Image (cartoon, rainbow, N blue to C red):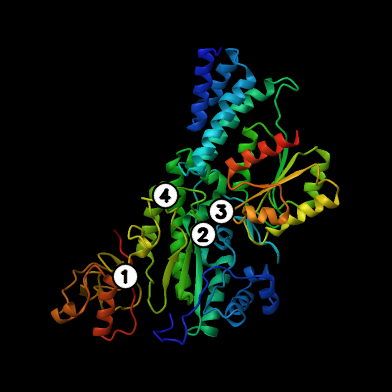
Amino acid sequence: VFGGRQGQRPPVGNPTSIVCHGLMDKAGVSFPEAHLDARAMADLAVSGSEVLGFDTLMPEYSVVQEAAALGAQVDWGDRDKMPDVKVFPNPDFADIVIPKDFLEKPSCRVVLDAISILRHQVGGRVAIIGKVMGPWTLSYHMAGTQNFLLALGMGEKAKVTKMLRQLMPVTIAFINAQFCAGADIVVLADHATGNLIGPYHYEEHLLPIHQEITAQVWSFSLDRGWTVTTSNGRSTPGKPYAASEMKSPWSAISTTRKLYCKGRPKMFINRRGMRSRPGCTSSHRSAPSRLPRPLRTCGPSSKRPWKVIEALIERYSIRRYWVFSYRP
Amino acid sequence: MRDPKMTDILETIKEMVVSGKFNGIEAEVQRAVDSGTDLNRLINDALISAMDIVGKRFADSEIYVPEMLVSAKTMKLGLDIIKPLLQSGEAEHRGTIVMGTVKGDLHDIGKNLVTMMLEGAGFRIIDLGVDVKIEDLIDTAKKEEVDIIGLSALLTTTMPEMQNVIEALEEAGLRNQVKVIVGGAPIDQGFADKIGADGFGADAVEAVQLARKLIAESH
């Protein structure tokens, strides 16, 4: 995030909302305008760095920005109360129509504009963290939390899957838009939390969706762009789905088979230390070629893909590189 | 001596609630009613007993909120068949509890689960919903002869509101008549003790056990 520069202390970040009354007073900005106005949103975010001293800042405070853009009736709250969905637009699990101008809806545009403002203001000095709701959280907002969980419990798999799949493009589009706007990191908040659902629910319904999201988010750039998820189901003995486990898509750092990207990467490297040149800028399927032997021998084994990639970066003096997740 | 036929009926209904077979519960309960099954036994030995099992399985992480919601829905469908048939005074109300998520907090899944479990356990429940003002809690406590106020909070920022409710009850002269129980993700026994609550339930099962204990002690 900081271009490889090493500071005199470890950077300290906070990927959650840190706003409190004191911070609103110091910033001279308060809720609800910080949810609705890009300048106010950015000013409040900057206070997380300038007042509290974090090396990161996050300009999105609510969890309903996307839901509002999708037609949910939102109460934007006040200084003491966070925004909340008042009327769920799809309690009957009817088809969800995503507006073509979804990203231009005010509640999404404000986040993108705030990130852009911050990029110009503090980019490169403080890491900018974006935030996007995953399809599970969005389902809570579209159908109602209890209603959605009840459908899950009643075994209405078709309904649940349809809603998650219809909402998945919203998550992907907003992640990519936030990276484009200037985010260094995007947190994917998907509240499939262990106090509500079990690991088997996550495995059956959400793990495949998260894997697809990973595969379709193109902009995992190491010097500008990591995606972090806050959803992993509950880790129970014998059933771990924490991000540190390779079964979770979010721990996968590699390039393989099918890649989606914009721009013109000069080389693709996969987790086994294979490299290749891209065939086109939108997708890549060309077979990788083997690395020169000296590099392979100096690099660690394929069991440590990140070390292999680091060795390649050093070997070829690569200054800017992207790391893609893979489609299993 | 127990009637084996009645025991079978009760066991069948209990199993339907535990496994969340909501589609057939109304017909099964109606069949039990038509065959002359004692209504209070139907409630206590089938429906409430089933929710005790469900609560235990939830506490042991064998099932999660979706399954628990379906069992609670199944139980409620059964209760809705029986309740109109109970003559006045026949229903064994175990006490009146007013439930609410404190002011500033909009989370209600935990509160709803506790509410359903308490209802299933035979308590009369007045659910004030979320973002509940202190005045509404006090007014309800006065008007409805409430035994217990159950407060829920998910946010650390709204936890202090629980203490405000207790102080307001003291100011209104109701504290000795009304017990206060608290729960929610950030709450623990230490916090409950600190604010002077009468009890803390870590989950819906503990909340029901706590309510039973407090009511038994007060009578």
Q: What numbered label is drawn on residue A199?
A: 4
Q: Earlier in the sequence, mark 3 or mark 1?
A: 3
Q: Amino acid at mark 3?
A: His
Quadrant of the image containing the C terminus of chain A: bottom left
Q: Residue at x 20, y 72 (%)?
A: A274
Q: What numbered label is drawn on residue A141?
A: 3
Q: Earlier in the sequence, mark 2 or mark 1?
A: 2
Marks 2 and 1 on same chain: yes
Instruction: Report whether B129 appears left or right of A208.
Output: right
Q: Horizontal and vertical percent for residue A316?
A: 24, 85
Q: Residues under labels 2 and 1: Cα distance?
A: 24 Å
Above or below: residue B68 compared with residue A77: above
Pair 3/1: label in front: 3
Chain letter for mark 4, please: A
Mark yes or no: residue B70 visible: no
Marks 4 and 3 on same chain: yes
Chain letter for mark 3, please: A
Q: What numbered label is drawn on residue A99?
A: 2
Q: Residue at x 59, y 66 (%)?
A: A107
Q: Amino acid at mark 1?
A: Ser
Quadrant of the image containing the N terminus of chain A: bottom left
Numbered disc 1: secondary structure:
loop
Q: Quadrant of residue A248?
A: bottom left
